[in-house]
Amino acid sequence: MSASTEPLFDPSLKKKKKKKTVAFSEDPLGADADPTTPAPPLTPSQSNGELGPATVHEQMKANGASGRDEDAEDIGQKASAKAAAEEEDPLAMFGDLKKKKKKKKEIPFDLEENQEESTPASASAPEPSAEPALDDFDLSDLKKKKKSSKKKVDLEAFEKELENSKGGDADDDDIAAALDDDADLGDDPFAPVADVPSGVDTGSEPWLGSDRDYKYNELLTRFFNALHAANPALASNTGKRYTIAPPQILREGNKKSIFANITDICKRMHRQPEHVIAFLFAELGTTGSVDGSGRLVIRGRFLPKQMENVLRRYIVEYVTCKTCKSPDTLLTKENRIYFMACESCGSRRSVSAIKSGFQAQVGRRSKNKTG
Amino acid sequence: MSVQNLNSYDPFADEGDPLGDNKDVGSQQNYIHIRIQQRNGRKTLTTLQGLPKEYDPKKLLKAFKKEFACNGTLVDDEELGQVIQLQGDQRLKISTFLTEEGIPKATIKLHGF
């Protein structure tokens, strides 16, 4: 995200609702990723949709949150292609901000399903794969069900039986979806992770129909399906998402921006405002102050979108636990070093200090006597 | 006769002085920091700090200036050594340039919005 490519005025940004919260997917960063790696450059497709979850496990979780949304798939298509590759982009956290506004959904949903664009059938409907894991969702509002590509009708009948035993009231839609599936059965079986078959249904592996060997990704998917079928609690207990309000940036005069809801955001992240402010100043390379009503006045012109990116980076670096990705962490200072202790998994690690680094001389030299 | 347990044996003797080769222990590792600063209007300034020793900043600056069609300068800083300053937002360009030259992406840190 660069200042030159950023539109200076985005009309959609003005219409933001105050109440709206931004969904932040648990952690786009893998547990083993280097915490200090830079954010990869933002590509247009990324700024549009949220990034996909990195692993199949996360994917299933994500699908659990998103599977109910009937038009998730078109957005999913957009976001899917780059999803896996750029998993460590902190920009993912606020990614679905615009989409959410359009849809007026209450539940924050993941837009991605990590489907390959080359598979029309798999992209045509949300996936039922995370179904055993979802006990908090009503299955009746499921409009379409995605079937993995199966050539045999009796298998479908078998799966229908399965669905009925699980979801009871969704059978009408099931039949419709089954017909749908027959219509566009021309999907290729080579989409490895995109095609997540139902966990209990072992007859749907794409390699069964042909005499090719199975691939690693397919086996991995199969393993996770079996895992989630056996342990429904795995996906559902971490299903809650971390949401924070989008930053409200007002312009004061020509050269100053006001970050209005920084206290809210700090409270939400359980971080000291001073720490967050120090990080913001170091990252943005500016200075500023806190005014009487707790708002932050920053020198320079900033858009809410840019502020989001910085906040995302803050969250990835200083809020989420690197081990379990939980945002439930405590930041304490011992001997001038900050330590982050996770409340949910108990891990403890030191985090890098905030350094502003080299600051170039901007503005008039006469103001700065030392330089 | 000497009691072996009482010998003052330094197990880290062959390690050398831990602080000897690297002065700034505890500070940031050898990251290349690319930062942006806002100037007046919509002008910006990009700084590149922490370039590894094996690269000649002067030549790199020349290449940057030619490649990105911008002006730039080399600034001497007391702590941080030589810092490359470029006009305009060249962060992404610098990052891709450096990665294409074989600098691992993990060592490059992009700052700013």
Image (cartoon, coloured by chain):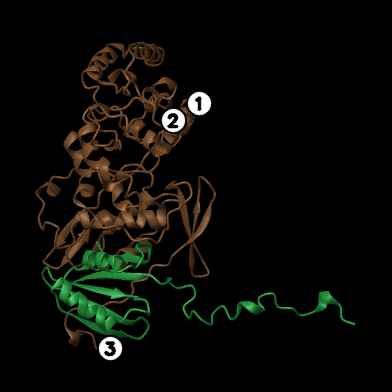
Chain colours: A brown, B green
* Disc 2 crowd, CA 10 A, few/some/many (<14, 14-19, 20+): many
Disc ID at residue A222:
2
Q: Earlier in the sequence, mark 3 or mark 2?
A: 2
Residue at image location 47% in from the left, 28% down from the top: A226
How far separated are the C-alphas under marks 1 and 2? 12 Å
Judge from the rendering whether residue A246 lies leftward or rightward of residue A62; answer left or right.
Answer: left
How far separated are the C-alphas under marks 3 and 2? 65 Å
Residue annotated with mark 3: A370
Question: What chain does badge 1 belong to?
Answer: A
Image location (x, y in percent) of residue A344: 50, 45
Image location (x, y in percent) of residue A292: 26, 62
How far separated are the C-alphas under marks 3 and 1? 67 Å
Quarter of the image holding residue A139?
A: top left
Q: Earlier in the sequence, mark 1 or mark 2?
A: 2
Q: Amino acid at mark 2?
A: Arg
| Quadrant of image for the C terminus of chain B | bottom left
Foreground pick, A249 / B101:
B101
Residues behind callouts 3 and 2 on a single chain: yes
Q: Secondary structure at mark 3?
A: loop
Quarter of the image holding residue B43?
A: bottom left
> Eyeballing the image, is A165 above or below B2?
above
Residue annotated with mark 1: A230
Residue at image location 35% in from the left, 54% down from the top: A266
Question: What chain does badge 3 belong to?
Answer: A
* Disc 1 crowd, CA 10 A, few/some/many (<14, 14-19, 20+): some
Q: How many marks?
A: 3
